[in-house]
Image (tube, helix red, strand yellow):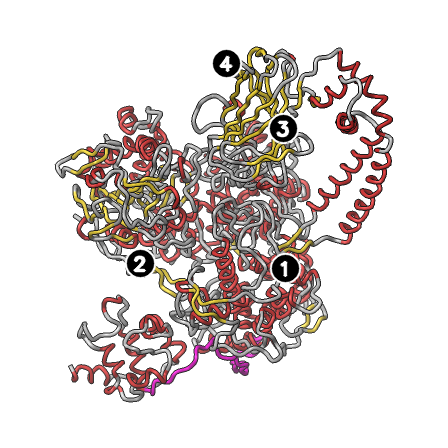
């Protein structure tokens, strides 16, 4: 055994492997689980992540004495490391790396990403004239080391198309291509870069990844997943990017804009970033549990977005790989723990506090005007009311006379006893309605006992009214504001004698929820009943229940009515008013007028009492045309206008700090109800300390993240910028810069870029503005000006084998466009795209029923697409319901926005092909691009096809391509000429107008355009 | 790769498209070395086994093991007695806990194995000798969504890849015209299982591995229909045009393998337009088959159509099929909080005949050997009553029963036991991770080797657990 070991050791090489690139990944994957930073799972009290602690078993420089080497080479299953039970054996190559490392003295280095980036001198290169920027020297040096040649520059059409797509998400127009091709000036390319960086489309395009990071959506998530309005934050984001807000400022405002001295409204809006998380509104949830989840979500999102760290791993235990303890996690947690929030959703379709109104000056002026008008109208009403007694005196006899000739259909129920079987209490309101409160039984029955004037009973009118005190300010008592009425029954109980049961045969209402028709009442089927869309509708509703024949009501008999809600749990009636009638059924309808009994009595007596006068006056004021009523109506109308305006005033959920911070604790196993030791806000020890003068609070944290001394922030951001323009980051794991991160392909370049971002040195100017610190536009310009970026993407036989994945950048990058860009590109090519910056989210085409499968309640059901501009806005404005995210976006690898997502995959599936071929968006775009070719292209078939080709892929077709397209077009033309019906059908796809001339031609060009919009070149940015 | 080779490949694909046999698109691409670019290429398992595809009948809402397959005579003896020391927070309704409650159904022995089965399965009970029961299952949450996530994805949280995604990732696709992983949900308007699409999501795996949800009404897949006014022939011509143009690009870009994959994705999409409706066309089946599944029986015809579709899909190379019995919670699924007798009679009535027919049909076609049929839900139910006018049973994460049939499992065996009243798994406990490890094993995969690197860590379906239940493997 010993000899074998020596033999094995004898073959070691002498150079020390790079600890970070070669050694740490082996230790991290194979050893740290049991011998790493997590003290709780550490075996044999041995840790290998710190040199000091590992020295004893390492025996640096002395392979024969090294326990580590002995163990990894051992063939004894009880001795070998990692133990076979772990199923993570080391390969021969890995063992050799560890041997070389120990032999060379086992040097450790801190994890590269946790050390300050160093700006190194860009390397010397042989082909110095190829390098336009220092970036190119880093890239070229590596290529030369591998004896590879960089690719030639891409042709100019391709270059402009690439640049436009990367900077704005949209391709160039044919005119822009032409202008660029004609521009022979040496800075033609730079001019294009500046033009695109100044376009407002830049902010829209660059905002898309931030929507994924911040889990932005238009719904609250969880069970009901109702709507919210967070778009003012999204608009802040676009504006901040367009205004080129320096990244440190951009960061501080999003994390703690509310805490800045004299914070502006916009700085508060920026903090919506960390309010874009889901909020739970399910009945019966424990608010504190969900508040803790929300705070943890903020920690994870902030860590992933700015630091590239998976902080969440330390929620339940010390981090397995990164030197982050559970205590440090909860110290970080403490920064986000002081928002005055409950953890529970305020309402199923609304924003939850803290909020700010994002009213505009225009809004404010309108509100002030209405408030003045309301005051004036109220004064006028008061004045008019003074005249009422006189007017009523004059009117009452006339009205009495008028009534005496007619039979009053509905009598409002006046005096009555209302009781609930389930113990609910009833309050009688001004308008004669009853409002239940108190216990809301599983199944409740309301019993009403009243008397009746007149000698017959035919039926009862039930009016259900919305009330602010009911759940969801709606009609029913269930938590979503709905009710389900199962039965209505009753009897006439004479003073002496047997009760006569009532049998209701005619039942009608002026509204029923789909599937919950009024006809279900009293039909005896279990699970059925009458419901009223309480969660969404909130309008008064009437229902009548008529007996087949009038039933005699003896003097002093009691009318007893019971409303039974026994279909669904707790779906009991809310506020209601009742009226009775004795008229013949034929004369009765839902519309019938209801004169309260008190009014009739007051009219009948010789001298009304003051109380009766009051009843008359009240009725007169409400129902008969008179100056007081007119004034009242004006007040009501103005109030409604104001309420509507207020409703329209967008709010946005923002961060806010409580005056005194909440206590924070280490939570055992991450459970909200298992607090252990208390902790104060603090930073992980492996990262630098707080900048001087910053407080240990959320604002201080934001300043710390946005500090030039933070080794992660700038590296993480420049790497994502690199990924944006080059397809893959220098560090492939753009989401993770922890110990488990992929090692950078060009470490010195990454560091140089991180430094350059924070402190520009290259004299880059964007539209004449010199680069400042943390300048995103200037940095983007630096990248796209490089020779590396401008390379042709075509793989070459001479370099392909050496650089198949293009990690060395031996050619230009080529990758599939994201779902947003694809749809935008199609709309743009077709001329359908409606460009308008910001505003509420819009509703393009989506499959019918897309929203209904995931939720049964809430206002985000029964999706209907817009019929106007909303169909054609840029895709980033599409309304996003988390549990049913836009299917075509999911298809192209968008995340569902439930939680923070940093990186999207780029798959290639048949379902994507189906979408591009058949989805109404793309077929309509093809139809319109076809129309565009016919209208604006020159008159020959070839010229038209060329024009369409330019719109689709920003270049002219080759003669072969043109021939192929022309042959296809001819065939289609022949087909549609003989099949005009098919042409008509094809041209009817989509909501946009379709001219009804030249049908066959239009249809044929539609199909040609459909091919163009499916070209690989269309789907790919190359 | 030169043009000649490339043309050969095209020709081969065309021939395969004309139905030369079972050579999937995926395997062809693999032969051509394009597998790296086609994530759905059929891959070799870690070791050879019988099962090629899975039909998972997800008994949604939590079926009661003691009223279905886990016969507990002691429970009948102690009917009405209080369960000493019972934690009333085990289920959901802590204030409605009743005494022990015997099953409302009669159990009788069936088959050669003499397995006791509840009377609600008059048809399935005839097949007990094909089934391997696991009675000692247990999970981690008493709440629907987390328990569904655990059963589907291994962890009680949203965002992890489900079993179907892992299987598709591990084995690729055998079909050249249908998705590899299909999910069918309740067609009676009772909604999706709680947690919805996250139950068949690919989590951090590439989305190409997520389940394709066949919508229960309307078009089964979005955008499956050609635009009005365009016929199949025309679209074929469109695709040929497209292919020619893309191909020209391809000649210029000889190494651009993703382009080859894209060309194929269009072809697959085109085939799917006819293949998907064709796979769903259960009315094309002969009358006796339709009758066997219960397509003419109003009570169960919806599940019959799904089971029959599942068989047709297996025949057509679909790798993983999941059928959900029931919709959301409460009376919309097997979630028998109230009236366990009525609830389970109803849902057993909807599924008994179709699933029995599926077993028989697969068996008589010789497909059962290579098809693993799995039956089970997200948790079991409690032996104590949930008080109600008609008593029900509350959720029970401590005990649940699964059975599997075909695909290399032993027939007529039972593994593990619950305690004598069925409250908790007691003998040979089988965690969700163990169940998953066993399913992967039956498909020829080592659950510890089937990993995916995400966020700097190798993830697996079974997290850090999982023991294969070897006792049920033939």
Badge 3 or badge 1: first in the primary sequence: 1
The lab-note entry on whether marks 4 and 1 share a chain reads yes
Q: Residue furthest left?
A: B112
Q: Which residues are magenta?
A: A104-131
Relative to A834, is A24 on the left or the right?
left
Q: Which residue is mark 4?
A: A498
* Vertical placement of residue A300 versus A500, above or below: below
Task: Residue A112: say if magenta.
Answer: yes
Total marks drawn? 4
**Residue B434, numbered circle:** none
Q: Chain of mark 1?
A: A
Badge 4 or badge 1: first in the primary sequence: 1
**Residue B450, numbered circle:** 2
Q: Which residue is mark 1?
A: A237
Q: Disc 2 vs disc 1: which is toward the camera?
A: 1
The picture places residue A763, in percent across and down from the top left corner, at 66, 76
Disc 4 is placed on an element classified as loop
Disc 1 is placed on an element classified as helix
* Quadrant (top left/top right/bottom left/bottom right) for the N terminus of chain A: bottom left
Q: Chain of mark 2?
A: B
The lab-note entry on whether marks 3 and 1 share a chain reads yes
Q: Chain of mark 3?
A: A
Q: Disc 4 vs disc 1: which is toward the camera?
A: 4
Q: Quadrant of residue A248?
A: bottom right
Q: Residues within 10 Å of mark 1 (few under 14, many from 20)?
A: many
Mark 3 and mark 1: Cα distance apart in space: 50 Å
* Vertical placement of residue A980 versus A111, above or below: above
Mark 4 and mark 2: Cα distance apart in space: 78 Å
A905 vs B406, nearest the viewer: B406
A749 vs A459, nearest the viewer: A459
The picture places residue B80, in percent across and down from the top left corner, at 27, 38
Mark 3 and mark 2: Cα distance apart in space: 65 Å
């Amino acid at each position: 055994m010993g000899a074998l070991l020596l033999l094995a050791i004898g073959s070691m090489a002498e150079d020390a492997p790079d600890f970070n690139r070669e050694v740490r990944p082996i230790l991290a994957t194979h050893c740290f689980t049991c011998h790493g930073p997590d003290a709780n799972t550490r075996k044999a009290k041995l840790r290998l992540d710190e040199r000091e602690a590992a020295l004893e078993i390492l025996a640096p420089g002395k392979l024969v004495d090294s326990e580590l080497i002995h163990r990894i080479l051992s063939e004894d299953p009880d001795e070998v490391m990692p133990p076979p039970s772990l199923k993570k054996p080391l390969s021969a190559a890995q063992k050799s790396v560890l041997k070389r490392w120990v032999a060379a003295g086992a040097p450790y280095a801190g994890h590269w990403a946790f050390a300050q980036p160093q700006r190194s001198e860009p390397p010397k290169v042989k082909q110095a004239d190829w390098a336009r920027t220092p970036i190119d020297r880093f890239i070229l040096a590596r290529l030369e080391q591998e004896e590879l040649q960089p690719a030639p520059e891409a042709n100019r059409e391709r270059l402009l198309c690439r640049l436009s797509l990367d900077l704005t998400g949209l391709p160039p127009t044919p005119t822009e291509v032409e202008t660029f091709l004609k521009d022979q000036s040496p800075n033609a390319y730079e001019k294009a870069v500046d033009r695109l960086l100044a376009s407002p489309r830049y902010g829209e395009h660059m905002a898309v990844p931030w929507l994924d990071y911040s889990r932005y959506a238009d719904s609250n998530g969880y069970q009901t997943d109702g709507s919210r309005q967070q778009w003012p934050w999204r608009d802040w984001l676009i504006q901040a990017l367009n205004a080129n807000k320096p990244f440190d400022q951009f960061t501080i405002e999003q994390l703690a804009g509310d805490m800045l001295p004299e914070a502006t409204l916009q700085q508060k809006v920026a903090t919506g970033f960390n309010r874009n998380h889901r909020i739970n509104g399910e009945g019966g949830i424990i608010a504190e549990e969900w508040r803790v989840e929300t705070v943890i979500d903020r920690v994870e999102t902030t860590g992933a977005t700015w630091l590239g760290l998976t902080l969440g791993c330390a929620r339940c235990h010390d981090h397995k790989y990164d030197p982050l303890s559970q205590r440090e996690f909860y110290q970080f947690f403490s920064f986000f723990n002081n928002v005055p929030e409950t953890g529970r959703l305020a309402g199923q379709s609304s924003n939850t506090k803290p909020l700010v109104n994002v009213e505009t000056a225009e809004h404010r002026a309108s509100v002030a005007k209405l408030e003045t008008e309301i005051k004036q109208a109220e004064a006028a009403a008061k004045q008019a009311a003074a005249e009422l007694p006189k007017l009523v005196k004059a009117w009452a006899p006339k009205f009495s006379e008028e009534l005496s000739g007619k039979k009053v259909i509905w009598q409002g129920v006046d005096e009555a006893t209302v009781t609930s079987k389930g113990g609910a209490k009833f309050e009688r309101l001004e308008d004669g309605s009853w409002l239940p409160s108190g216990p809301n039984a599983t199944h409740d029955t309301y019993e009403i006992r009243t008397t009746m004037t007149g000698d017959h009973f035919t039926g009862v009118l039930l009016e259900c009214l919305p009330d602010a005190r009911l759940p969801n300010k709606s009609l029913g008592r269930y938590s979503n504001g709905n009710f389900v009425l199962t039965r209505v029954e009753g009897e006439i109980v004479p003073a002496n004698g047997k009760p006569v049961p009532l049998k209701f045969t005619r039942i009608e209402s002026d509204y029923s929820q789909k599937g919950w028709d009024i006809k279900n009442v009293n039909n005896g089927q279990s699970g059925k009943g009458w419901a009223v869309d309480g969660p969404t509708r909130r309008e008064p509703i009437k229902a009548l229940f008529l007996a087949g024949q009038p039933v005699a009501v003896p003097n002093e008999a009691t009318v007893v009515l019971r409303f039974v809600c026994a279909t669904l749990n707790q779906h009991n009636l809310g506020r209601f008013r009742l009226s009775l009638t004795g008229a013949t059924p034929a004369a009765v309808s839902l519309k019938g007028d209801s004169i309260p009994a008190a009014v009739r009595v007051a009219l009948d007596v010789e001298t009304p009492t003051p109380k009766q006068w009051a009843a008359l006056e009240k009725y007169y004021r409400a129902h008969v045309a008179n100056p007081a009523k007119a004034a009242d109506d004006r007040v009501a109308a103005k109030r409604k206008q104001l309420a509507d305006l207020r409703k329209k005033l967008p709010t946005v959920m923002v961060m806010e700090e409580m005056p005194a911070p909440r206590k924070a604790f280490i939570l055992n196993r991450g459970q909200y109800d298992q607090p252990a030791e208390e902790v104060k806000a603090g930073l992980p020890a492996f990262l630098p300390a707080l900048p001087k003068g910053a407080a240990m609070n959320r604002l201080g944290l934001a300043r710390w993240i946005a500090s030039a001394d933070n080794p992660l922030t700038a590296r993480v951001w420049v790497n994502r910028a690199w990924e944006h323009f080059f397809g893959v980051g220098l560090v492939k794991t753009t989401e993770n810069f922890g110990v488990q991160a992929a090692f950078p392909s060009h470490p010195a370049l990454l560091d140089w870029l991180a430094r350059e971002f924070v402190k520009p040195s290259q004299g880059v100017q964007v539209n004449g503005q010199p680069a400042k610190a943390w300048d995103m536009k200037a940095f983007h310009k630096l990248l796209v000006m490089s020779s590396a970026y401008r390379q042709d993407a075509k793989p070459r036989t001479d370099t392909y084998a050496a650089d198949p994945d293009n990690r060395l950048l031996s050619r230009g990058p080529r990758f599939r466009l994201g779902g947003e860009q694809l749809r935008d590109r199609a709309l743009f090519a077709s001329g359908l795209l409606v460009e308008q910056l910001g505003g509420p989210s819009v509703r393009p085409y989506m499959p019918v029923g897309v929203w209904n499968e995931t939720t049964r309640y809430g206002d985000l059901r029964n999706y209907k697409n817009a019929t106007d501009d909303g169909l054609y806005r840029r895709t980033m404005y599409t309304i996003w319901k988390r549990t049913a995210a836009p299917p075509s976006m999911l298809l192209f690898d968008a995340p569902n926005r439930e939680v923070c997502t940093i990186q999207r995959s780029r798959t290639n599936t048949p379902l994507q092909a189906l979408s591009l071929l058949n989805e109404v968006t793309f077929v309509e775009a093809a139809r319109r691009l076809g129309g565009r070719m016919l209208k604006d292209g020159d008159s020959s078939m070839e010229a038209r096809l060329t024009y369409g080709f330019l719109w689709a892929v920003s270049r002219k077709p080759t003669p072969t391509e043109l021939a192929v397209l022309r042959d296809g077009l001819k065939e289609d033309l022949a087909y549609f000429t003989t099949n005009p019906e098919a042409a008509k059908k094809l041209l009817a796809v989509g909501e946009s107008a379709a001219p009804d001339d030249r049908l066959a031609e239009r249809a044929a060009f539609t199909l040609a355009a459909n091919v163009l919009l499916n070209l690989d070149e269309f789907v790919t940015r190359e | 790769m030169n043009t000649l080779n490339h043309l050969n490949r095209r020709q081969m694909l065309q021939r395969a498209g004309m139905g030369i046999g079972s050579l999937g698109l995926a395997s062809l691409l693999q032969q051509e070395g394009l597998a790296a670019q086609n994530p759905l290429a059929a891959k070799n398992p870690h070791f050879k086994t019988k099962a090629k595809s899975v039909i998972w009948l997800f008994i949604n809402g939590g079926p009661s093991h003691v009223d279905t397959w886990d016969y507990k005579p002691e429970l009948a003896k102690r009917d009405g007695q209080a369960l000493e020391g019972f934690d009333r927070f085990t289920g959901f309704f802590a204030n409605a806990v009743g005494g022990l409650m015997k099953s409302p159904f009669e159990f009788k022995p069936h088959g050669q194995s003499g397995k006791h089965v509840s009377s609600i399965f008059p048809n399935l009970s005839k097949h007990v000798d094909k089934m391997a029961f696991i009675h000692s299952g247990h999970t981690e949450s008493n709440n629907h969504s987390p328990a569904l996530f655990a059963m589907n994805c291994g962890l009680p949280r949203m965002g992890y890849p489900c079993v179907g995604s892992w299987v598709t990732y591990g084995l690729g696709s055998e079909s050249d015209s249908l998705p590899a992983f299909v999910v069918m949900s309740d067609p009676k308007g009772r909604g999706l299982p709680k947690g919805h699409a996250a139950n068949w999501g690919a989590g951090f795996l590439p989305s190409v591995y997520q389940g394709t949800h066949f919508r229960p009404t309307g078009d089964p897949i979005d955008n499956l229909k050609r635009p009005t006014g365009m016929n199949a022939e025309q679209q074929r011509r469109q695709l040929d045009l497209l292919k020619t143009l893309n191909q020209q690009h391809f000649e210029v870009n000889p190494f651009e393998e993703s382009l080859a994959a894209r060309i194929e994705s269009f072809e697959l999409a085109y085939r799917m337009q006819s293949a998907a409706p064709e796979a769903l066309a259960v009315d094309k089946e002969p009358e006796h088959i339709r009758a066997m599944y219960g397509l003419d029986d109003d009570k169960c015809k919806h599940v019959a159509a799904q089971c029959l579709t599942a068989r047709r899909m297996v025949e057509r190379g679909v790798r993983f099929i999941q059928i959900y019995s029931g919709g959301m919670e409460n009376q919309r699924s097997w979630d028998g909080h109230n009236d366990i007798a009525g609830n389970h009679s109803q849902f057993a009535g909807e599924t008994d005949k179709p699933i029995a027919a599926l077993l028989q049909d697969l068996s008589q076609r010789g497909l059962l050997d290579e098809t693993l049929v799995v039956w089970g839900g997200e948790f079991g139910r409690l032996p104590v009553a949930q008080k109600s006018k008609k008593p029900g049973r509350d959720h029970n994460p401590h005990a649940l029963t699964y059975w599997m049939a075909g695909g290399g499992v032993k027939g007529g065996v039972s593994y593990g036991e619950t305690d004598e009243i069925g409250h908790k798994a007691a003998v040979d406990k089988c965690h969700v991770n163990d169940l998953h490890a066993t399913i992967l094993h039956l498909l020829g995969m080592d659950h510890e080797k089937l990993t995916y690197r995400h966020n700097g860590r190798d993830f697996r379906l079974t997290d850090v657990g999982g023991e294969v239940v070897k006792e049920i493997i033939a």
